[in-house]
Amino acid sequence: MRLKLVPDDTSWDFFGKLPITLGLSGLLIVISIVSFFAFGLNFGIDFQGGTKIRTESTQALDVGAYRDALAPLDLGDVAITQVFDPNFDADQHVASIRIQAQSGEEAITQETVQAVEDALKAVDPAVTFVSVESVGPKVSGELIWTAVEAVIAALGAVLVYIWLRFEWQFALGAVLALVHDVLITIGVFSLFQIRFDLAIIAALLTIVGYSLNDTVVVFDRVRENLRRYKKLDLKALLNLSINETMSRTVMTSGTTLIALIALLVLGGDVIRGFVFAMTFGIFTGTYSSVFVASALLLKLGVKRDWSKPDGEAGTQFANVDA
């Protein structure tokens, strides 16, 4: 007997509380926008500007000890990562330390650099300082606009892809669902002032791809059922399609969450922001595929065109059981 995460006879009504689910999404988007303009984002070094210090040591690195040593200096946002390279010698341990700009200055002062060196040598006498590089405000500003352009370009590409593959109603529903995911995720980072850096931009783009994948699976099944059940009410047809793909949705989201939660708990501070964004994005992406994209498709309606063949539908994995 196979284990089924979702029974075959599942018949949940996903649109029974449509005003509540869409109202909740609207409320969260409003809160996100208000929070963004009221509190802004807690930009990391990538966007604020700052200084990058590269160190080497013959002793094994202890990132936690480095971070504790620098904490009394009150330098603000400090990111410490160990650099791995197969070309390094066995006793060559390299670290990258990024320190945010201090008091509006483009780079930390020489006195601050010296204080950092003294603090690290106190916990690792073998440490040497290979390079000190600064990222100015101009470069950081360019990174912000580049990141915004990347997200907008991704949403635009999705709009064109869905429009060509389905109909304009599907495209509009999918893109608005993706905008819903991105806005709410950014709102959470603004509301709780979680550090926002280039890794979070990568997470947002990944969320866009993941949410789109969920939405396309549902829409593929909707397209199949539109041809299969020519007289079935659109609301009932959408409910049927979502229920038929629910097993696949639960399995993929659940297995992805297992890996992400493990990284969130055990991955350490360096990747915690990225993993948190991904974890939150899995929830919002799955929610929006069902309660936003499909609900908007219900509101917009869809033209039933029976002249197109069924062979292009891509739902061969939609009913995979775990």
Image: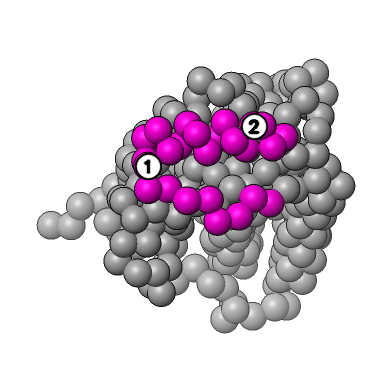
Report crowding for label 2: few under 14, some 14 to 19, many 20 or more residues within 10 A (C-alpha): some
Q: Position of residue 302 (x, y in %)?
A: 75, 55
- State the extent of the magenta-drawn residues as a range: 109-133
Of the 4 image quadrants, the one containing the N terminus is: bottom left
Would residue 244 appear left or right of 311 to someone viewing this image? left
- Mark 1 lies on residue: 125
- Residue drawn at x 83%, y 42% as measured from the top left: 137
Total marks shown come to: 2
Q: Does residue 129 belong to the magenta stretch?
A: yes
Residue 177 quadrant: top right
Q: Position of residue 141 (x, y in %)?
A: 84, 45
Q: Quadrant of the C terminus?
A: bottom left
Q: Whole-percent x and y of residue 214? A: 54, 55
Label 1 vs label 2, nearer the camera: 1
How far apart are the two marked residues, 1 and 2, measured between alpha carbons?
A: 19 Å
Earlier residue among tags 1 and 2: 2
Residue in the picture at 62% in, 64% down = 223
Viewer-proximal residue, 264 or 140? 140
Mark 1 Cα shell of 10 Å, populated few (<14), some (14-19), many (≥20): few
**Amino acid beneath label 2:** Thr
Name the residue rendered at 62%, 26% in the picture.
76
For image coordinates 49% across by 68% down, the residue present is: 315
Q: Secondary structure at mark 1?
A: loop
Instruction: From the viewer's side, name the closer residue of 208 and 5.
Output: 208
Q: Residue furthest right?
A: 138
Q: Is residue 264 left or right of residue 235?
A: left
The circle drawn on residue 112 is 2
Q: Amino acid at mark 1?
A: Pro
